[in-house]
Amino acid sequence: MKRNMIARTAAAAAAGALCLAMTACDSSAGGQAEGGGEENQSGEALKVGLAYDVGGRGDKSFNDSAYRGLQQVQEELDVTEVRDLEPTEGEADTDKEERLKLMAEEGYNVVIGVGFAYAEPMKKVAPEYPDVHFAIVDSEIEGIDNITSLVFAEEEASFLAGAAAALKSEADHIGFIGGVETPLIRKFEAGFVAGAQEITPDIEIERAYLTQPPDMNGFQDPARGESTADGQYDAGADVIYHAAGASGNGVLNSAVANDKLFIGVDSDQYQNAADDQKPHVLTSALKDVDVAVFEFVKSVAEGNAQSGIQRFDLAGGGVDYSTSNEEEIADIQEQLDELKQQIIDGEIEVPTEP
Amino acid sequence: MSQTLEVATPQVAPPRARNRWRILSIVFAAFVALSAVRMFTGQPVLTGSGTIQATLAFAVPIGLAGLGGLWAERAGVVNIGLEGMMVFGTWFGAFAAYTTGNPWAGLVAGVLGGVFGGLIHAVATVTFGVDHIVSGVAINILAVGAMRYLSILYFQDAPGGGASQSPPLPGFPRVGLPFVDSLLGPVEERQWFLVSDLAGLVIGLTTDMSVVTLLAILLVPASYWLLWRTPFGLRLRSCGENPDAAESLGVRVNGYKYVAVLVSGGLAGLGGVFLAMVASSIYQEGQTGGRGYIGLAAMIFGNWRPGGLAMGAGLFGYTDALQVRGSGGAVHALLVLIALALVAVAVWQWLRGRRIVAGVSLGFAVVLGAWYLLTDTLPRELVTYSPHIATLLVMALATQRLRPPAAAGRPWRRGGGS
């Protein structure tokens, strides 16, 4: 009986965890983004839907960048019908399919999946709605006419982040924190390491990933981000670069608490940091998801929709490093710009695998 | 009255004093071994003060969930809904702290949120006799959906918020003993055998601690005192062992069950507050990450006792802290410790005449030792799951007899015993 009870509790605990993961159903999430209040002047009724990846709006990084693009669409293209939907924790691919279908069914003619997690669902859904313009950020999909892939050369921006970290590090010891060890995030790591070694060949680099796939929680666990950053700073690193979405907020907290430097990702994290945090944000590896989203919607609005694979890199714009923290960045900006030019000219080949 | 009940409660257990010395000596031996391993592998992170602090941060929510499970199960109610009650705690704590700007209001609201979850569970299981597991799982599912709904209502349009997270939240004050860091800090850095490790432990436990952490730690002895040293606790536990006997002696069984499940929910809610406002400074969907279930595992590991579950939570927290702070290198060093422990097991089993078990243990020890010597670090995929692996290993190695409350999980109706 006792043994039976233990087994029963354990089994129930396991079953509970499973149920929680599986039934965390899409509670028709999201809602109307605040209406622009503007009249729709252009004749065609453009309806734009945006589906986020884990982390969602408020991560001050990747998803927020996409949201800025959506806001810009609202303001500059006078599109009032916009909607953004957030995923639920631990959802299955079928939930993402449903989300895309939902928007297509409701008459959204531009549907954008933010994040590589939408690749497989979109491949399934897009052929069923040939009149809808789909776009996916961070994944290359070929062979389906109504899907446009918006991809970035993250490694190039990360290279500049690595160079900046190496130039600013007094101990020649820096750190990298990735959210989840996926091929995409490894690109960030590869670029960062290469950039740092370009400046200081024997630099010491702490590297950590918060979780391993398929556990995508590493993009939304600020507590773990903070502890990991504490560990790296305690180990001697004095600049940390993160590619961990919302978990990066914890990394920034740790940088402030330890009085060390932090490099942001995707958005210019100097702009959305609190005032007491700003001095610690050295720079950010920018990835202009907002520009990509805006340009894509604009091309649809103008009647000549982008198609195929749209690549954004240093040469063409779309990735860069930020210079908003002038106090910290001023003395190394010249060197960084030189490196940037070398990458654009093809003199430096940035690896995509660490 | 209480003496008659006492007969029903404990099974044959070894004398308490002897048991306590045995546990203390095992803990001390483990600490000495850890110190030796640190010297041998040159991984100061193994016993550093930062690691101890991170251990506390990871262990507290698990320990609170475990304590919640302990209260409920001691009164005979299995509470698989701890996870959902933690979710209530994270959201309501965040909401109150955000709207009032006062972290203490968040603490109270978070605990009340957990109590609310407990109330649902109590009404379902105690009053209506619903299967405990079914009710608990329902609460877990309900919590996630309901909090998402409330987030959309209240956090969606707040600056910095979203459908799955809150705006930044205020933090709690931190406390610590003065001078400890400046006095013992240099000692820790010397890396002397045992002395520096003790210094790291003391610094980690006495400086820069959130008041919620302190509160959570104090709740462990407080629970022990209340449940094992007061008439109230005796009656509550009697409801979990033999409710019919308790009822025949005039104990209001359902009343005690209600109190226990409400306290259980409150503790889980406090764990949620800790996650949202101490471990991080933001509410985020999925923040609990299954800690309610791990808390239950810690409780089972601790044989339904506060001290044992604190050790279980500490063990999980420690391995998690190691993998987060020291990454591959530190966990790699743990291989040596596990190998040492296996050798000890082998010797002990050999002396008891169980040659085969001893041989197998020794074999594993050799394999682990070789693994340590032939590699420099562990693959990241493995390191991430080291807390779970460590818990499994210790669970398997621990040769303790587990004894759950006899009537835990059984629906009970008033007057059923007559």
Image: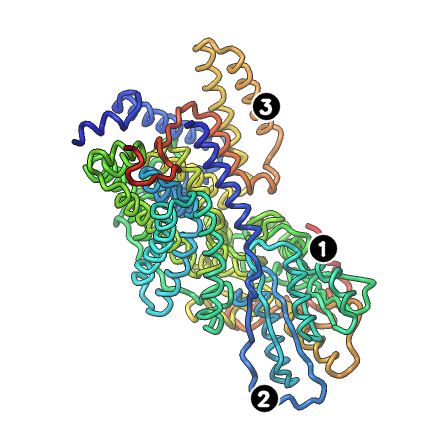
Residue A208 visible, this angle: no
x 31%, y 32%: residue:
B241
- In the displayed structure, B173 sits above or below A335; it is above
Task: Tell which of A40 and A284 is nearer to you.
Answer: A40
Tell me the kind of residue under disc 2.
Glu
- Could you tell me the amino acid type at mark 3? Val
Where disc 2 sits, the SS reads loop
Quick one: quadrant of the N terminus of chain B?
Answer: top left
Tell me which residue sits at (21%, 40%) in the image: B232
Contact? badges 1 and 2 (CB < 8 Å): no
Chain of the residue under the numbered disc 3 shown in the image = B
Q: Which residue carries the number 3 mark?
A: B367
Q: Alpha carbon of mark 3 to alpha carbon of mark 2: how far?
A: 70 Å
- The location of residue B304, given as percent across then percent down, is 35, 34
Identify the image quadrant of the C terminus of chain B: top left
Establish whether labels 3 and 1 are both on one chain: no
Inter-mark Cα distance, 3 to 1? 36 Å
Check disc 1 and report the residue beneath it. A352
Q: Residues within 10 Å of mark 1 (few under 14, many from 20)?
A: some
Per the model, the C-alpha gap separating discs 1 and 2 is: 44 Å
**Quick one: B172 or A29, which is closer to the camera?**
A29
The answer as to whether the residues below labels 3 and 2 share one chain is no
Report x, y in % for residue B271: 38, 50
